[in-house]
Image: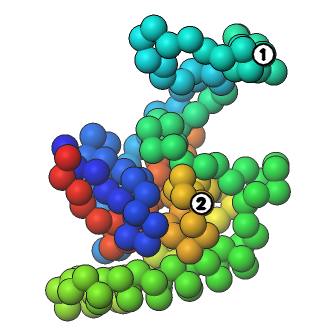
Amino acid sequence: MLIYTDLISGDELLADTFKIQESGPVLWECDCKKYLKSKNEDFQLEGANPSAEEANDDGGEGEAVMVHDIEDQFQLVWLKAEEGMKPSKDAFKQHLKIYMKKVLTKLTEKGAPKEKIDEFKAGAPAAVKKILGNYDNYDILMGKAMDGDAMHVLIDFREDGVTPYATLWKHGLEEVKV
């Protein structure tokens, strides 16, 4: 199995269990699934005794939230617009400028082939234009480290209006064999 980690933060963002498709020379897309998850649905060791504090959580047993599988599996943090967490388009544009520089620096430090660096340099401006042109439609998620300079995972819906998909920067991911 392959896990893809963020080149900047080291957060796990993707796995080869998702159907990954290239979207231009520098972006990857993968279809996601949305499902209902109980708010208190966490793993417990067999025989573990929950503390009295945990038993008195405000959430009821029947409460559930809709999540994307990529969000749930990699513990991504959703920057919700209604909570004022989603950055403005201008702020996100600034983030992308910083992110591009950091990715180029990391690729150089890690001794990436010149072709890979050139591909990123050549494809990044068109990818940024595509992302900013569709910015209002995206849900934005961050890795669990909440590193503001790291990759932000973008979620949108396919033309059918039902199938969610994630967009990630191909060159900003590092492949880890598990």
- Total marks shown come to 2
Q: What element carries label 2?
A: loop
Q: Nearer the viewer, residue 122 or 85?
A: 85
Query: Percent from the top left, x then y, of residue 30?
Result: 38, 49
Does residue 51 appear anywhere in the picture?
Answer: yes
Query: Percent from the top left, x then y, of residue 120?
Result: 34, 83
103 lies above or below 1:
below
Please report the residue visible at 57 percent of the width from the left and 66 percent of the height from the top. 147
136 lies above or below 112:
above
Q: Label 2 crowding class (10 Å Cα cut-off): few <14, some 14-19, many 20+?
A: some
Mark 1 lies on residue: 56
Mark 2 lies on residue: 146
Q: What element carries label 1?
A: loop
Type of residue at label 1?
Asn
Residue 99 lies left or right of residue 79; in this view the side is left
Q: Which of 91 and 76 is in front in this view?
A: 76
Please report the residue visible at 81 percent of the width from the left and 21 percent of the height from the top. 58
Q: Label 1 crowding class (10 Å Cα cut-off): few <14, some 14-19, many 20+?
A: few
Type of residue at label 2?
Met
Q: Which of 137 and 17 is in front in this view?
A: 17
Please report the residue visible at 51 percent of the width from the left and 79 percent of the height from the top. 99
Residue 58 lies left or right of residue 65; in this view the side is right
Mark earlier in primary sequence (2, 1): 1
32 lies above or below 60:
below
Distance between mark 2 and mark 1 Cα atoms: 28 Å
